[in-house]
Amino acid sequence: MRLDKLLSNSGVGTRKEVKVLLKKKYVKVNDQIIKDGSKHIDPERDVIKVKEEIVTYQKYIYLMLHKPSGCISATVDKQEKTVIDLLDQELQHYKPFPVGRLDKDTEGLLLLTNDGELAHQLTSPKKDIEKVYYAKIKGRVTSEDVKSFQEGVILDDDYQAKPAQLKIMAQGEISEIEVTVTEGKFHQVKRMFEAVGKNVIYLKRIRMGNIILDHSLKRSTWRELSENEKEYCLSLKSGG
């Protein structure tokens, strides 16, 4: 890997800023001053320092974000605020992207990574990764709705959704539920409830696979995945 690319990807600075650091002899590889950014290095073996501080190279990042309502699940948008805009510039250098998507007005668990293989494993329809949502529903959710979800409701485009688990937590003019789905069609949960004559007025994702939204995370904040959570992700990549 090129030295200038590693430094840039590690958040040391932009390519232009890295070039200046190299020119000023602030960069060392194995305690030797290096001025040539094109020098190829091995991040696993070589020790890189900038102003005598060791630079630790991290290829992939895995983040849990508590997505707020009002921002979109995209990397860039000219008009709307994106989930990437919520991250520090240091993390944005890794070029993370959202794993799957949550609608603009949906809150909750969203994973961000630059690991394309993991993202594929988590979003592939063949993997049947469970996604659990908490929702408030306008109208009384009934046992008949539970049965309909178990059988797979027919959406507005005549697509039959996969069987889903619907748990009623509170009934009334506004019902509270948890629903578990294994696919991610456009407006999936909202359309499923519309299919049984009801409307979602609040939606929050609380789990994806074995990763559960950290309740200590406030809206718009994030943290790196724990070691156990990372192990789960790596097991998916390895086919576990």
Image (tube, grey):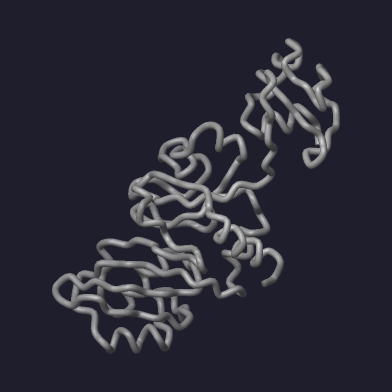
Residue 195 vertical position relative to residue 87 in the rendered view, above or below: below
Residue 149 vertical position relative to residue 50 in the rendered view, above or below: below
Q: Quadrant of the N terminus?
A: top right
Q: Residue at x 83, y 26 (%)?
A: 38
Q: Quadrant of the C terminus?
A: bottom right
Q: Quadrant of residue 227?
A: bottom right
Residue 2 vertical position relative to residue 178 in the rendered view, above or below: above
The residue lying toward the viewer, choosing from 81 and 129, is 129
Residue 124 percent coordinates (x, y): 60, 68
The residue lying toward the viewer, choosing from 46 and 35, is 46
Q: Quadrant of residue 202?
A: bottom left
Residue 230 vertical position relative to residue 235 in the rendered view, above or below: above
The residue lying toward the viewer, choosing from 191 and 40, is 40
Q: Going by the picture, which residue comes out furthest to the top?
A: 24
Q: Residue at x 25, y 76 (%)?
A: 169
Q: Quadrant of residue 139?
A: bottom left
Q: Residue at x 69, y 24 (%)?
A: 15
- 90 left or right of 20? left
Residue 211 percent coordinates (x, y): 49, 63
Residue 18 percent coordinates (x, y): 69, 21
Q: How many marks?
A: 0
Q: Residue at x 80, y 26 (%)?
A: 29
Residue 157 percent coordinates (x, y): 44, 74
